[in-house]
Amino acid sequence: MDRQKLYNFERKIISLVYPNRCPFCGKIISADEYMCFSCPEFLPYVKKPLEPIENVSRFYACCFYAYRAKKAVLGMKYGGLIYPVEAFARMIYEKIKEELKKADALVPVPSGFLSVKKRGFATAEKIAERISRLSGVPVLKALKAQDDKQEQKMLGMKMRLENARKAFYINDKADISGKKLILIDDVCTTGSTLSVCAELLTNAGAKEVVAAVFAKTYSISRNRIESKKFYKKRVYLK
Ligand SMILES: [Zn+2]
């Protein structure tokens, strides 16, 4: 039995006890699905190129951090739900298929010790592991988080950057020199975390760093328009 089949089998067994649910609306779905039939229509997809992030060659996000996409992220982050991971991984995988062909490794943005303890799992790491199963590109834990990392979401832009600089360091045991890496995270807010992580990896010898996340928050100026457009469409659909 290959790894994908084994994984699907595991999921079927688990779903007998914990039914698999659509992470975006909560509907029960079969074990081999990762979202229901109706949700794809309602997700706030990122369709245009995003503003570039310093030190990152190319940046990809599947959805904007709003509506059902936000609900699914919150379910994973604060509700301790594991099934959104599958949807996020598959969506990122579809989005960056071409990048994965050229990549040497996936580098998850590490979670602090406290948030792992709270949630029971490291979110970006779990997503990266799933993308790795789908693509065959290995996961490389090249970054580590300081234990006392402050929660980024409470901070302003300047503080975020300073905080992110202090929050991460290179894992000495990981061999990254000359490698093309893809940074993986669940949500990107200002891009400061991804920028700092990419800088650390480049300084440690990585050839190129690309970043991919499930959701990007709307930046105040440019993406507010997208938000309004989406909102109008959503009201119309109702
Ligand atoms: Zn759904």
Image: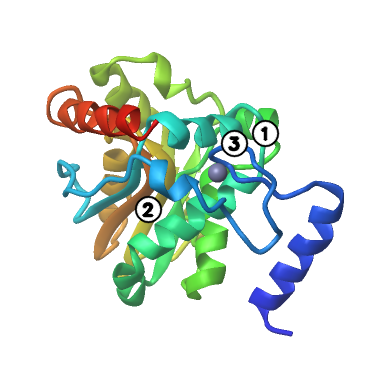
Q: Which residue is mark 1?
A: 80
Q: Residue at x 31, y 55 (%)?
A: 204
In the image, residue 110 sits, relative to residue 93, either above or below, namely above
> Which of pointers 3 and 2 lies earlier in the amino acid sequence?
3
Instruction: Give the residue type that dot 2 points to.
Output: Leu
Q: Residue at x 52, y 70 (%)?
A: 134
Element assignment for label 1? loop
Q: Are marks 1 and 2 in contact (CB under 8 Å)?
A: no
Q: Residue at x 48, y 45 (%)?
A: 39
Q: Residues within 10 Å of mark 1 (few under 14, many from 20)?
A: some
Q: Are marks 3 and 1 in contact (CB under 8 Å)?
A: yes
Element assignment for label 2? strand
Instruction: Give the residue type that dot 3 points to.
Output: Met
Q: Residue at x 61, y 27 (%)?
A: 78
Image quadrant holding the C terminus, namely top left
Residue 182: percent from left, percent from top: 35, 59
Q: Residues within 10 Å of mark 3 (few under 14, many from 20)?
A: many
Instruction: Give the residue type that dot 1 points to.
Output: Gly
Q: Give the quarter of the image for residue 58.
A: bottom left
Give 84 or 107, whichever is nearer the viewer: 84
Give 214 or 153, whichever is nearer the viewer: 214
Q: Which residue is mark 2?
A: 183
Element assignment for label 3? helix
Q: Which residue is mark 3?
A: 76
